[in-house]
Amino acid sequence: MRLIRLDGIPAWASPTGAMQDDTNAPTDLSYYQQYMARVGQDSAAIRQAYFPNQQNDYYQVTWEPVWADAPSKLVDMYKAVYTGLHSTDPNAVVMGTTNPYMADCQGACTGGVLQTYAALGLGQYIDGVTTHGYYNAGTYPSHPPELNDTNPDPAWVRTSLDKQMQELRSVMQGIKPNMRLWQTELGIQYDPGVTYGPNSPSANQLFAQAAVAARAHLIILGEGAQVTYFFYGSDYPGDVGYGTFFDLVHPQGQCGASNLSPKPEAMAFAAMTRIIDGTQTLGRLNGLPSMVYGYAFQRMGGGKVITALWTHNNAAWPTSTGAYSPTYSTRYALTVDAPGTSGEVIVYDMMGNPTKLAYTNGVVQLKLTETPQYVVSTNASVIQANVTAPVGYTGQ
């Protein structure tokens, strides 16, 4: 499926006389609405011709906006986009506002911006929400999404990725119930000070990047996003390490590089996609011990359940560039079947390697580490009775 990005207006249509990317509304919103009608007509034709099994066309109106125009102009622009697209594309899903962070702030957070502009009527002109998933100012392995979950200060706990997702879904539900949520950009770069070089990054840095990135996207899906996007394809100059693949030609990376080699992160993403794609989110597991994380997903059509689990301990994961423990572990007993039953489940590690594991009395004993593992079981009702579903999540 395509995500059709609409952000940016050319200089001739801009009130400043220069190209603007999500700072100002076009000078002629009537023309802009007519243009969006043509975009909707074209997109609907492309979908019918090339993607006949795709149910909707998905449009992202703004991309990390830094709005400088009057607040009412943002709503007017969304109205023009929404009206134009829906006039020609009956299957349009118009989404925004795609701020860099999800919640727990105002100007740079999707949840805060939605609340601010909902008072001006924005909710009438969106069908769903898009956000970027950066959960701190620099998303590094040394700042994993669970870093502040055990902080004694509730204000810091709210900054954890799972709490931001819960807050965002709550805000969405108050604006327009049961909207779709897409996370359209999240990457994990190397820690500050790490450079590209013959002996850098270290194997430990690459391990940490893979583990943190996989956990972040699992949290996003588990807390109620229908779609999540990995960022970025190859390493590129400037922001060191955001690439999912090494660039084998350009020493400092290059946008659009084509001679690539997968990082551990790429392999973790490949395994996660193969295992989790095509599922519905059931929600987070109830009653988890501190520093244990788990989300359940069910294959479409009432199929098998995949429960993703891991542990995170700040003591084994220093908040500055250092050695991240690949061996720290804790035990967890997961109920996968009815009491008195025994059998086997398949457990996949972060890279997709399968192991058969026996369970007794409906319970499988797991050794959790900082890398996610996926437990595949068949008794969905048992898992469903032990999860909290995301607010307003309606599935795929």
Image (cartoon, rainbow, N blue to C red):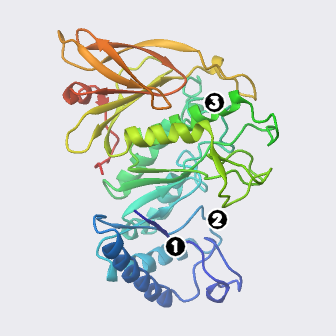
- Visible residue check, residue 155: no
Mark nearer the N terminus (1 vs 2): 1
Mark nearer the N terminus (3 vs 1): 1
Nearest the viewer among 130 and 77 is 130
Q: CA distance from mark 3 to mark 1?
A: 36 Å
Camera-near label (1 vs 2) is 1
Residue drawn at point x = 22 percent, y = 30 percent: 380
Q: CA distance from mark 1 to mark 2?
A: 15 Å
Residue drawn at point x = 81 percent, y = 41 percent: 195
Give me the disc on residue 207.
Answer: 3
Q: Relative to residue 73, is residue 94 drawn left or right? A: left
Q: Relative to residue 281, is residue 151 drawn left or right? A: right
Give me the disc on residue 121.
Answer: none
* Looking at the image, residue 355 lies above or below residue 168: above
Residue highlighted by disc 2: 66
Residue 309 in the image: state x and y as whole percent.
43, 26
The quadrant of the rendering that contains the N terminus is bottom left
Residue type of the residue flagged with mark 2: Val
Residue 354 in the image: state x and y as whole percent.
40, 25
